[in-house]
Amino acid sequence: QVSLPQIVVGAAQRQGPPTAPPLEKTDETFVTQKEIIEEKPPETDTAKLLEHQPGVSVQTGGGVSGLPAIRGLADDRLKIVVGGVQATSSCANHMNSPLSYTDPNTIGRVEIVTAVSSVSKGGDSIGGSILVTPKSPVFATPVVAPGVVGPGGAPASPIVAASPYPPVPYLPLPVPGTLRFGPNNEVLATGTISAFFRGNNNGVGVSANINMANDHWSLLYNGSWQRATNYHAGGNGDKVLSTGFMSENHAVTLGYQNEGHLFTFRGAYQNIPYQGFPNQRMDMTRNRSYSLDALYKGAFEWGVLEARAYWHQVFHKMGFLEDRFWLNHPMIALGRDFGYSVKAEIPYSDQDLFRIGNEFHGYRLQDYWPSDLTGFTQGFATPPGSLSRPFANVNINGGQRNRFGTYAEWERRWTTQWSSLIGVRNDIVWMDTGPGQS
């Protein structure tokens, strides 16, 4: 037995003012356009934009299909809404996660609720919420010639005060990314384009935004394309098989605004011909989706009203990429999401704000494995029934899920440091499916 001498640890009293108080804790964080621009060059996966936020981690899968997790809860336990569309992962392995249906080029802002979501932002989840807002159309301002004055001799302002969204101010001198044209320079054109190359996996990509508008109408296009081969392990390591991918995204938004009212109609298309998943048994051999979204926002004397309707359809197929297995028996999923939401914000006083809303989300799913009775699988002769029974294996036949929700919420600011949020929500879910086959 050995006795150690007594150890005394001390420190001199600190001189000067006390340390600054900790930053205010919040359960809501935002990924702004500035952060997205900084992260966009190195990232092809939208979920990767969130991994630096407090409480958020990302489960890496394919090149564009990461699964975000908030404080350990991920996937269907979170409410993920992209541009008002609550897309469902139709793939049994969730290869087509909701955030995979958009790319960093099309995002305007991301709101992350890491705590228990409020009734106005939650529903149908036990974890947090991720609300993705696409880039909004930009409207031009009326052109004001130099020297023109307004009432009372004040300089005339080109800003449209009745617009709920501040338009881009008139720029009399040419600047990068903007252009004025038309008989009276009433048409504003803005745009950006970016490209990248990565040596490890020969990754290449290009993305562009083009917006043309006058003071009432706007047309916005967002597009991107990217491709990568299998990447190499560190040092002199070999290739990591099934890590290549290719994807393209296109979205067109038509907008109209007038006297505090905004209407937008957005259509989007995505095509992923292939995407390798080294951590799963199978790969994605096709994923093609279409979506439509109509939105109305209006400012009234009593508050703000927002109404939205959406439709989203996906064709998804799993199989084996050629570098993993030369046979390929597909597994197919056909999914469709549709719904609407209506909500209002009513300021009652300087301290009180009421929110009410109603929403519906419907989902349809057909999941099956086609028969290989012919004995041919992707051009290769195989014994009939070797990869599947001679009849199609129907896992989910005409699956249906419907959710109808209503909520009311009261937010009050008691002081600059204290606030309260009280709400009640009711959701009704009903499901059904047809007979399966194996």
Image: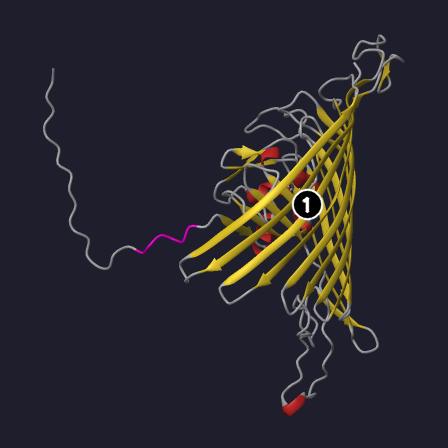
* Residue 373 percent coordinates (x, y): 87, 12
Along the line of sight, the residue nearer the viewer: 91 or 182? 91
For the record, the magenta segment spans 20-25
Dot 1, how many residues are within 10 Å of its Cα: few (below 14), some (14-19), or many (20+)? many
As helix, strand or loop, the secondary structure at mark 1 comes to loop
Residue at the farthest bottom position:
153
In the rendered image, which quarter contains the C terminus? Answer: top right
**Image-quadrant location for residue 178:** bottom right
In the displayed structure, 77 sits above or below 171; it is above
Kindly identify the residue that appears in the image at 83 percent across and 17 percent down. 392
Q: Quadrant of residue 78?
A: top right
- Residue 179 appears at what percent x and percent y? 75, 69
Q: Is residue 153 left or right of residue 29?
A: right
Query: Horizontal and vertical percent for residue 386?
Result: 80, 9
Residue 292 visible in the picture: yes
Residue 292 located left or right of residue 15: right
Front residue of this view, candidates 379 and 425: 425
Residue at 10 percent of width and 21 percent of height? 3
- Colour theme: secondary structure
Residue drawn 54% across and 47% down?
Answer: 118
In the displayed structure, would residue 400 be above or below residue 190? above
What residue does disc 1 label? 103
Image quadrant holding the N terminus, namely top left
Magenta segment main secondary structure: loop
Q: Please determine whether, in this image, residue 137 is positioned above or below residue 127.
A: below
Count every numbered label the image shows and give the total: 1
The amino acid sitting under disc 1 is Asp
Where residue 284 sits in the image (x, y, percent)?
A: 73, 28
- Residue 241 against residue 87 in the figure, above or below: above
Q: Is residue 246 magenta?
A: no
